[in-house]
Amino acid sequence: MMPKELSPITSRVEAEGVTSLSFLPMSVADLDEVLAIESSSHIHPWTRGNFSDSLSAGHWAYCIRPELDKAVKGSYLDPQVLWAYCILFPAVDELHLLNITVSPNLRQLGIGSRMMSAIEGVAVQQNMPRIILEVRPSNLSAVKLYEKIGYESIGLRKNYYPVNPETGSREDAIVMAKSIKLEP
């Protein structure tokens, strides 16, 4: 069962009026916005079918938008603007992060680390002691983020990603995991 909404992550950016991020369940109506970010973010972006299949399969899919004290319509502070999204697959005893993407215009602002913190909170709420993910070795900023917040490399999936048209070769995936301390 999908948690209806993740608890907002409290983080103040006073000058901009943003008080927290809002994690809202993704729906088919969100897919045009999601695909716009996805296609500008990845060499091999997920397709509408990939996202639709995840939604149909009951994966936990969230759209991340700003929660504001004072909305600024038509700007990135507009709560209608999609900042990021994530897709989580709940397994028996672990949470598998399938996709996490921040809009290119909003990277390096701490949104990814705040999202990961919220995802870890979901793992605690759902009594899942581990989060697992795959990441491209060439995605250095993501690898650095995951290492910084305590993820460890636990394996390698050879030739995991499709052929990169720029290099003509497939890329491996680093499998990373983090143990989550559960409340007794």
Image: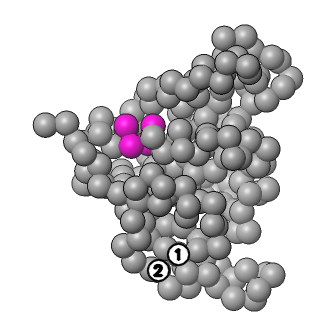
Identity of the residue drawn at 58% across and 74% down:
137
Task: Name the residue that disc number 1 marks.
Answer: 173
Asked whether residue 140 is in view, the answer is yes
Vertical arrangement, residue 59 with respect to residue 153, above or below: above
For disc 1, the neighbor class at 10 Å (few under 14, some 14 to 19, many from 20) is: some
In the image, which residues are magenta? 118-122
Q: Secondary structure at mark 2?
A: strand
* Viewport quadrant of the N terminus: top left
Identity of the residue drawn at 41% across and 59% down:
151
- Does 84 appear in magenta? no
Q: Secondary structure at mark 1?
A: strand
- Does 121 appear in magenta? yes
Identity of the residue drawn at 71% across and 54% down:
38
Labelled pair 2, 1 in contact (Cβ < 8 Å) = yes
The amino acid type found where label 2 is placed reads Arg
Quadrant for residue 66, please give it. Answer: top right
Task: Name the residue that disc number 2 marks.
Answer: 157
The chosen color scheme is: one colour
Label tally: 2
Asked whether residue 28 is in view, the answer is no
> In x, y percent, where is residue 92?
25, 54
